[in-house]
Structures are given as C-alpha cells and as structure tokens.
C-alpha cells in the first residue's frame, strides 16, 4: 500500500491530513488520487458510504486549484445539507496549511442572503445541495460557467430523492471542458445515463461489487410480531447497551417522533431527526449525537441522508426501507474505517420476502438472531453492574475525616445487610413480574418462543465465557482474531461479545473443544484465563434452557451457578447465600432467582402505536 506522499499529494496537504490523524489511504483514495492528479480524465467511482470519498476527490482538487484566481473553480453537489456541511468542513480542514483557499457551503434551511454574501467575498469551491444551488442560479448570485471540476457525491441518493432533473439542469450550465467525478454506492441505470451523457473517457474505479454491502458489517435480523416491535427494540438495546451508539431507522415522521418520545420517557438517551424539524433543531440534535451526548438517534431515510458520524456500532432498522437500495445506505453508516459494525433488522412476518430481495440484490447474507429474554437482559445488566464495582479504583484521598464520619452509619451494618441494600439500588428497577415476560421471538412456524438451535444471541452452537475483555486491551475485532488464531479456526465461524473484564464467544459445537483447550488455563498479560461453556444450544444447561447447571466464572473469585428460568437458582460471587423473601420466592446473594423484574428493561409495557403512514 502506498502512502499519501507516494500518491502525489503535496506537502501542505500532507501536513493537514497528518494533523487530522490520516495514516494510510483507503482503497478509493489510493485508486482515485493518482488518476485525478496525473490524468485529465473523468472519474466514475463505485464506493460505499464511509470509505473516504471526500479525501479521494478533495485532496487533488485542492492541490490543482489556483488560489490567485478569484472565480469558482470547483463545484461539489451532494444530496443533503448535513453532507454538504460535512464536506465543506473536511475541505477546510484539508486546506488548513494552504492559504487563500475559500470553501463555501450552500444549502436550504439557512440564510440565503448570508450565503450570497459569502460567495461575493470570493469562493474557490462551492459545496451545494441541488435545490439551493438552483435558487442561487435563478437569482444570478452564482456563476458556474467557468468551473474546472464538478463532483457528484452520493449520486444515487440524489436520484432517489428526485433530484435527477435538477442535477441535469445544473450540469447543463457548466462548461463542456470541465472534469466530472461521480461517486455512488450503487450503480442503477439512471446513474449510467448521467455518466454517458456528461462524462468523457471516464475511468471507472470500484472498491466493491455493485450494490454490495461493507464486509465489516454483520447483518442480523429477528422475527417478532408487529405489536411486539417496541418491546423487542428495548430488549435488544438493553442487551447491547455497554457499547451501543446507533441510528434507528423508521418509516415515517410520526413513527420516528413517537418511538423517540417513548424511549426518552423510558429513560433512554435518545433523540430524533425528521423533516418537521427546523435547521437549528437538526443541527442541535446532530451536535449532541456527534459528541455522544445522545447515544440513540431515530431518523427517517430522508432526514438521515448525508449523516456522517464516526464510530457507530449499530444501525437498527425498525422497518426495512421501501426502496431496497436504501438498505445499503443505511447499513453503510456503521462498520467504517476498518471497524466492525452491526446492521440489525426487526422483522415482522410479512417482511420476509423483502429481506430475501435485499440478500439477492445487495450480495449479503443475513443471520437470524434471537431477541434476548427478559432474564438475559437482567443477567447481563447485573454482570455489567458488578464488574463496574469490582473494577472501580478506590481514591483514598477523598476519604477525609468528615467523609468517614458520614460513613459511620453504613459501617455499623452487617456485611450481608449492606450488600443486599447496595445491590437493591440496582435491582429495584426489576419488578415482580420480570421473570414472566414472554419470549418475543417467532419460530419458523410462526409460533412465539422457539429458541431451539440458537444461543441467547441466535447463533447455532454453544456460548463460551472467557475471563478477558476490554480492560485487557481487546475490542470485538482483536478478540475475535485472538480466539481464532489461538484455536486455529476461522474467525468467520465465531461471534463474540466483549465487555469490561469478560467476553462471550458463540461458536459451533465442533469448535468448542479446540477453543477451551486453547484458552482455558493459559496466561495472558499476567492474567490467568478461564474459559468455560456457559450455555447449551438445546437449553440443557446454562441460562436459556432446562434444569441443568452451567457456570460463569473468571475474575470474580467465585462461581455463578446458572439454571433455567425458574430452575435451581443463580448465585453471584461464591458459595455463600443470603436468603430473602421477595415476592414469595427466594434469592441467592447476587443471583436473584426470586421474582423481581425491571419496569425499564424489556418490559411489554408501552407498545408502539401503529402510526398513520406519512412519508418524510
């Protein structure tokens, strides 16, 4: 792989991108930049969202511009205001050390007078949405008759949004001798028509198959009844809450707002984007989302087009999109920059045919997974809570005499009583009926609750507990690679869930002995590794089946006995048990086999009302 310098990028731009943390070019950048700099040919690029297209066309354009020339030299057209602002910010960052370059973004929802003023002060690059650009052209406030470069970014999205005539009108007012660069994630016939009409001797650059999905994205789905979708969504979010940073796609404005309101009411860190929001409201929501003040963003397809946010772990489809190609755009917002991502679909019975169409057209394979049970959610939440406490560092400096005096009443409590009171603060969120919540999954025959052949996350095989996690320097990708290399099996046969000081590996039964032999008892960075089967796919042991006993161990100084719901009970943290009456049942210390449940997690309380379909 060549570096940016070997691709021909000049030093002033190298200084800027190095400051931004760019190290090696992405495939689309490696193939596009030399063609742009060394030839005079047009470029037709096929690349998924998030592959680095802005730098692929932005760096060579900035290098070839003449800062002394005061006319508009480059025009970048994109489908949405969010993408328009993102591209203009990126181009400004790339040109930080190349003085005299002015980039102006023009888009709807902002003051057109201010944009006209910015253009009159001098603009070398205009980044525009089609509608606002045509408005400026009609006012004769912008002159694009002398541009040297025209870039159509996310061209297929522009066509999907109905901008085909607008794009052709704009291109018709640009000079014949310009260079055209067109980038698209998919290549429908309409894109080919534009390319044939407005591009000359174009070089085709492809970093993926047409309409294909990102290889770093795992595509999953669960099947539930339509009336259970909201409850299933909460279960899925709760089970993955330790690292969740996601966009949830809905079909209509009303549904987006409705589900957002329900999630906020139920205590989730969420907000929404849809077409009824003002530009100021949209920008406020996006700023909070980019800075992780919001972890869950609900959006319609139209509102979310052009959103470029790094680090998304999940894309959740509350409904599949009406336009199958939109699935590629939705899912492409995760799994960027070499990171792994999950695209998860909540499917009801009538959507199965559309899922198969997406598989066929997009060349991807969906995995069926199961919505976790209410007890699965509770157990994982409790494991995360206890691990947080165990791994919290004690700051002795804060325990002065006054603080210690205030703790005297706690110190007077018996250890068992203090432990129960302390854990009750977390467990009080679980109501008496928690264990009785139904299985939300629909089996092959349409029946509820078919879990045969799958572990808690829906993979055929067994689930293995490993006493290593993020605290040991692992993320999902590195942990999967490490397990695969250690056991000498393919990483494609594994699914992993990495938490703070422990992880789970879902593997086919034939690989389990190899994994246990390779990991159990070894030392990793001075830590003794424990690896053991935590659940059986048929439910004979572990937390999802019959009355047998499995165990979760590792790192907590004790065994956790585990059985089926309503079976022999659970215990966290060792042999000793503290019995307490709770709703007529008994609970073990930390195990809580009594009948307590959460009102906030996975309950079947609020159901999403089916809104009137009004498209954004």
Image: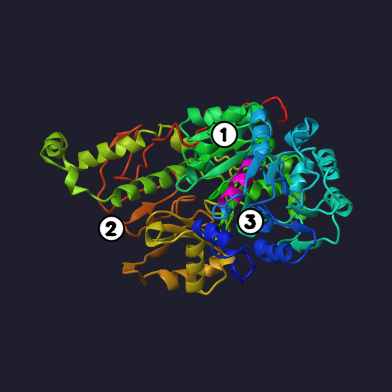
Residue at point 28% right, 53% down? 574
Q: CA distance from mark 3 to mark 1?
A: 23 Å
Q: Earlier in the sequence, mark 2 or mark 3?
A: 3
Is 174 magenta? The answer is no
Marks 1, 2: nearer the viewer: 1
Instruction: Report the residue marked by disc 3.
Output: 55
Q: Secondary structure at mark 1?
A: helix
The quadrant holding residue 439 is top right
Q: Which residues are magenta?
A: 84-93
Q: Is residue 109 left or right of residue 22?
A: right
The quadrant holding residue 283 is top right
Residue 447: image x %, image y %? Answer: 64, 41
Residue 128: image x %, image y %? Answer: 70, 40
Quadrant containing the C terminus is: top right
Whether residue 204 is visible here, answered yes or no, is yes
User: Which label sits on residue 283?
Assistant: 1
Marks 3, 1: nearer the viewer: 3
User: Which label sits on residue 557?
Assistant: 2
The quadrant holding residue 349 is top right
Q: CA distance from mark 1 to mark 2?
A: 48 Å
* Secondary structure mostly seen in the magenta stretch: helix
Q: Earlier in the sequence, mark 3 or mark 1?
A: 3
Foreground residue, 487 or 93? 93
For mark 2, does the 10 Å Cα neighbourhood hold few (<14), some (14 to 19), or many (20 or more) residues? few
Residue at point 17% right, 37% down? 410
Q: Is residue 368 left or right of residue 148?
A: left
């Amino acid at each position: 792989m060549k570096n940016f310098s070997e691709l021909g990028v000049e030093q002033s731009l190298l200084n800027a991108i190095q400051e931004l943390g760019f190290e090696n070019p992405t495939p689309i950048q490696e193939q596009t930049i030399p063609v742009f700099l060394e030839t005079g040919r047009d470029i037709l690029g096929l690349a998924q969202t998030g592959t680095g297209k802005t730098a692929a066309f932005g760096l060579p354009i900035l290098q070839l511009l003449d800062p002394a020339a005061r006319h508009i030299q480059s025009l970048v057209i994109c489908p949405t205001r969010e993408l328009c602002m993102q591209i203009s910010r990126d181009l400004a960052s790339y040109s930080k050390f190349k003085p005299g370059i002015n980039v102006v973004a023009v888009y709807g929802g902002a003051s057109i007078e201010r944009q006209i003023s910015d253009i009159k002060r001098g603009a070398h690059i205009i980044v525009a949405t089609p509608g606002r650009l045509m408005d400026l052209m009609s006012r004769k406030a912008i002159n694009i008759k002398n541009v040297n470069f025209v870039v159509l970014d996310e061209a297929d999205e522009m066509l999907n949004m109905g901008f085909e005539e607008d794009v052709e009108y704009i291109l018709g007012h640009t000079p014949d001798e310009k260079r055209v660069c067109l980038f698209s994630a998919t290549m429908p016939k309409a894109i080919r028509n534009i390319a044939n009409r407005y591009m000359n001797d174009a070089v085709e650059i492809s970093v993926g198959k047409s309409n294909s999905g990102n290889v770093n994205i795992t595509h999953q789905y669960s099947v539930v009844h339509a009336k259970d979708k909201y409850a299933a969504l909460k279960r899925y979010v709760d089970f993955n809450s330790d690292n969740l940073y996601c966009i949830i796609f809905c079909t209509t404005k009303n549904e987006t707002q409705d589900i957002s309101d329900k999630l906020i009411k139920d205590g989730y860190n969420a907000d929404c984007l849809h077409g009824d929001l003002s530009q100021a409201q949209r920008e406020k929501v996006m700023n909070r989302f980019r800075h992780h003040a919001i972890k869950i963003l609900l959006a319609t397809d139209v509102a979310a087009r052009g959103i470029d946010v790094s680090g998304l772990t999940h894309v959740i489809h509350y409904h599949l999109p009406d336009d199958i190609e939109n699935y590629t755009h939705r899912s492409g917002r995760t799994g960027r920059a070499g990171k792994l991502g999950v695209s998860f679909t909540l499917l009801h019975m009538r959507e199965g045919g559309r899922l198969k169409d997406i598989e066929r057209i997009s060349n991807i394979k969906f995995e069926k997974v199961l919505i976790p049970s209410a007890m699965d959610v509770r157990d994982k939440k409790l494991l995360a809570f206890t691990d947080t406490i165990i791994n919290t560092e004690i700051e002795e400096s804060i325990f002065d005499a006054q603080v210690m005096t205030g703790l005297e009443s706690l110190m007077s409590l018996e250890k068992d009583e203090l432990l129960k009171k302390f854990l009750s603060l977390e467990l009080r969120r679980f109501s008496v009926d928690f264990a009785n919540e139904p299985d939300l999954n629909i089996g092959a025959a349409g029946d509820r609750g078919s879990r045969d052949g799958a572990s808690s996350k829906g993979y055929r095989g067994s689930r293995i507990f490993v006493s290593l996690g993020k605290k040991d320097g692992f993320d999902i990708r590195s942990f999967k690679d490490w397990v695969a290399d250690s056991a000498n099996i393919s990483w494609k046969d594994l699914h992993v869930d990495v938490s703070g000081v422990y992880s789970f590996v879902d593997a086919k039964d034939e690989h389990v002995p190899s994994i246990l032999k390779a990991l159990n008892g070894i030392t990793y960075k001075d830590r003794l590794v424990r690896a053991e089967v935590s659940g059986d796919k048929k439910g004979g042991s572990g937390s999802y089946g019959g009355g047998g006993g499995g165990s979760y161990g590792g790192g907590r100084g004790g065994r956790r006995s585990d059985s089926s719901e309503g079976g022999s009970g659970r215990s966290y943290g060792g042999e000793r048990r503290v019995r307490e009456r709770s709703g007529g049942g008994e609970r073990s210390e930390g195990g809580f086999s009594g009948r307590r449940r959460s009102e906030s997690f996975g309950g079947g309380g609020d159901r999403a009302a089916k809104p009137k379909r009004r498209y954004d």
